[in-house]
Amino acid sequence: MNEGVGAPAAAALVTLVAVLLAAAGVLAIDIAGFAGLLLLLVGVAALAWGRAGDPVGAAAGAAAPRSPHRASDARPRAARGDDDRVVAGVCAGLGRWLDIDPPALRLGFAWASGLGGVGLLAYVALAVALPAPAGAGSAVPRRPALRRWTIVGGFALLFAGAGTLLSAVGLAPRLGALVVAALAATGAGLLWRAVAQRLDERETPRSNVASGARILFGLALLAFGALLTLRPDGVSSLGVGIVVAAIVGTAAALIVGPSLLRARREAEAERLERIRADERATVAARLHDSVLQTFALLQRLDDASPRVQGLARSQERELRAWLYGGEDPEGPQTLASALRAAVDEVEMLHSVPVDLVQPTDAPLDGDGAALVQAAREAMVNAARHSGADRISVLARVTPTALELYVRDRGRGFVLAEIPDDRRGVRGSIVERMQRHGGTATIRTAPGDGAEVELTLPRRAEGSVA
Amino acid sequence: MSLPLRRVVIVDDHEIFRAGLRAGLGPTIQVVGEAGSVEEAVPLISDLEPDVVLLDVHLPDGGGQTVIAPVHAQRPAVRFLALSVSDAAEDVVATIRAGARGYVTKTISAGDLTASIHRIADGDAVFSPWLAGFVLDAFGGSEPAAQIGGDPELDQLTAREQEVLLLIARGYTYKEIAGRLVVSVKTVESHVSNVLRKLQLSNRNELTRWAATRRMI
């Protein structure tokens, strides 16, 4: 008793002994009662020493273990504690769940154990009924073994002392009541755990049989306890009938109830999903009739500026992809969405309309991204140098390859005459495709426009619709 | 070259868009009538008997295909060119299979639209790049040969037809395709008409299935 417990503790002990002696005098207890008091005293001392080495946070109760749960803002599920447990972790777990200091609970159990062992039985029942801790990994380390067992011993002495003291003053409960209480506590624990599990939607349905069995077993224990209570007064057939009816009814409610509740929740979610789909279809029809038509008209007007027309085109394409393509803007990029983004960019930067045709989509990997980059470079080239008033792009997904065609009807060029400083064609298109295992073919002649043909062999993966 | 005057009816429920279509059609196209619904369109077309009907794929009281059947029953000579802004491939294919001789998007330039109308009036088929790309994909997939009621001639595209479609999808005009493949424009036109016939008559499961899952992106 040297660390953490100094002079104040010694003074407290002396005071306590004095108070106990005075109490013994007042209660006029015999030698057995006094022995009980002494046991209590030793128990308290053992507890004090056992806890003396705890970290500051733990000494102040379960503040430290509790805080991670507060930080995560989620109510912990009832389970046995792990990191700050003393015996089975019942008090630590319950304390965290109920937001009560575990030491206070421990004292409560000790006191109840003094009533002839009720608390002890309840503790065992809870240790059986409560699920194992969800996961280890708290910052608070477990106490060293010696201190842990000192605490256990302290509680045991407290139980024994309290029991001896109580029997000395004639307050010991009857054994029958103890058994009933133990049965009831175990039954209630099992029921609680099973029902909590059933209400928890994250649990998979395969636990249904186990939890049903747990409910029945819990109810049977409760019933047995109830019958034992009734027995001394003579079990009337009416009484048994009522108990059995109550048990069957409760069992049915507990087993079927959560399933019904869950089914209702699912039906509700489904209904909401359907409403959302309907709404989306309505919005799509409405936008189709108004906004898309306007975009299409804008692109046909002779007096609209190329910039406005480009904007109308890219907006139309974007809206269409969202309305009909079922594309998830937050989802991963696909060949179609990446190519469309590239086309929009080229149209905006160079004010040249690009007719994009891509009947089939495919997942996008690194090579596919390079293909799109090469196509973008080809479009930029056509927009900058060809003088064509529009560019045609076709993306094809065949079982064996991704094919991209970028065509313009501009002035064309002689491939061999491209200056070396124009990196676009050679570096960004031809060499890039080669690096990624594909090919690039350029077909052009002066006055005859140009077409860049990009091919990328596919790995074994399916296309997406 | 001198083109004959073509009489055209526009069926589209958007008045402003009909005005936009009308504006750029040029002197060789005469718009003789306009309708905004299936109900209006059928008697009007039967009455006027135009050369070509520009038909919106989507109308408030039904798809464009519901106009074609009753008109063709009375006036088999009237030809339809389907037009849409963004409808599902399903609707486009349904309209073509109902008898339309071609399909273009509404963003088509006035000059291209005029040329398409003349081509349709001459009995040829008009495929937009998108439709060509779609048909190529739809017919391209392997299909079990022994399909019940299937006609192998209708269910397959010839290598030449595939070449022509691929070039259309890439943005080539018929004339450019003819130059590229060293054939006459008439030959290209007959290839496209053959593809149209297969598209209209083939029993390929894939056509409908593909159409149902594809969108005009």
Image (spheres, coloured by chain):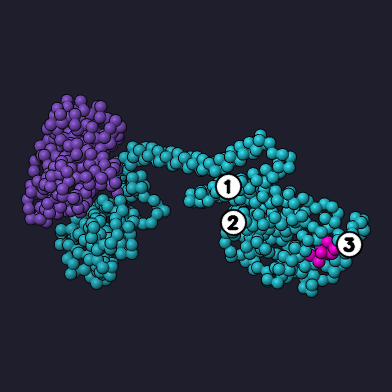
Chain colours: A cyan, B purple
Chain ID of residue with mark 1: A
Q: Which residue is mark 1?
A: A215
Label 2 sits on what residue type?
Pro
Rendered image quadrant of residue A157: bottom right
Q: Position of residue B178 (x, y in %)?
A: 10, 52
Residue A272 in sight from this viewpoint? no
Query: Which residue is at a point 22% across and 66% down the rendered structure image?
Result: A439
In front: mark 1 or mark 3?
A: 3
Query: Which residue is at a point 77% across and 60% down the rendered structure image?
Result: A159
Q: Earlier in the sequence, mark 1 or mark 3?
A: 3
Alpha carbon separation for disc pair 3 and 2? 43 Å
Give the total number of marks visible in the rendering: 3
Horizontal side of A105 relative to A247 (left or right) equals right
Label 1 sits on what residue type?
Ile
Note whether A87 is above or below A232 in the view shown: below
Q: Earlier in the sequence, mark 2 or mark 1?
A: 2
Q: Position of residue A355 (x, y in %)?
A: 25, 51
Q: Where does the magenta region start and end?
A: A34-43
| Majority secondary structure of magenta residues | helix
Horizontal side of A319 relative to A95 (left or right) equals left
Rendered image quadrant of residue A121: bottom right
Note whether A430 is above or below A216 in the view shown: below
Q: Which residue is mark 2?
A: A131
Label 3 sits on what residue type?
Ile
Q: Position of residue A259 (x, y in %)?
A: 51, 43
Residue nearest the viewer, comparing A154 with A63: A154
Q: Quadrant of the N terminus of chain B?
A: top left
Q: Are marks 1 and 3 on the same chain?
A: yes
Q: Which residue is mark 3?
A: A31
Res A458 label: none
